[in-house]
Image (tube, helix red, strand yellow):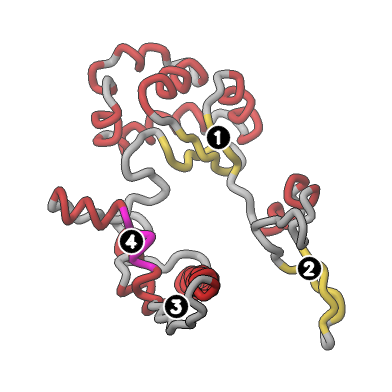
Amino acid sequence: DIVAQATSGLMSVTGYPDTPPTKVGTSLGDINAAVHAAFAIMAALWHRVKPGEGQSIDVSMQEAMVSIMEGAVVRWTVGQEILGPIGSHNTNESPMAAYRCKDGYIIIGTVGNEHWERFCRAIGKQEWMKDPAYETKGLRWAKKWELAKEIEKITSQYTVKEMEEKLDRERVANSPILNIQQVVEDPHLNARGYFLEVEHPVIGKAKISGFPFKLGKTP
């Protein structure tokens, strides 16, 4: 897994500019390759229905990981730009990252000028809407680190919940950053019946991750 993460370029764009190349927080190389393998098997089965012939399947962990590096790849092949690590920031838009609050961090996402203006209203910074330094998304992205400091001067005065309410009123995309306990206890996931309880021969009952899709006729 970690070799696939390293040889795909993923580790080179993960983390912050002043940290070493960083592995993502889960075994994405293993899991992503497995998903591609499952898709390849289904495609081969579908093909077999027509001519009645099977075929071999070759799945590369490295290639499965490079396939999710679409933006970074074309930044180099088209624009000769090597994308580096930018923390939780988006590669095209700003503000779109994690911002510090009194009791944790909140994700805020804006896309384009209309969202930017709604965000400015939400945090009481309407003057930013007329600031030439923030006039376009390209200018805002170029100043993402400086802008983040200014945003955190405001968000750090409020709890995550208080910031959620401010942003919701202006329809600005946002989310708390959940830890694993909060994910397992999440009312939405549990209402959808996502988690599965299985009987393990040694440890007894265990709750595990379920399927991220639901089938109407074959649950």
Range shown magenta: 65-70
> Percent position (x, y) of residue 21?
33, 66
> Label 4's element?
loop
To which residue does mark 1 refer?
Answer: 174
Q: CA distance from mark 1 to mark 4?
A: 26 Å
| Earlier sequence position, callout 1 versus callout 4 | 4
Horizontal side of residue 171 vs 150, given as left or right:
right
Q: Residues within 10 Å of mark 2 (few under 14, many from 20)?
A: few
Three-letter residue code for mark 1: Asn
Task: Check if mark 3's residue and mark 4's residue have beta carbons within 8 Å.
Answer: no
Q: Residues within 10 Å of mark 1 (few under 14, many from 20)?
A: many
To which residue does mark 2 refer?
Answer: 207
Three-letter residue code for mark 3: Asp
Give the numbered dot on residue 19.
Answer: 4
Horizontal side of residue 189 vs 28, given as left or right:
right
Q: Nearer the viewer, mark 4 or mark 2?
A: 2
| Earlier sequence position, callout 3 versus callout 1 | 3
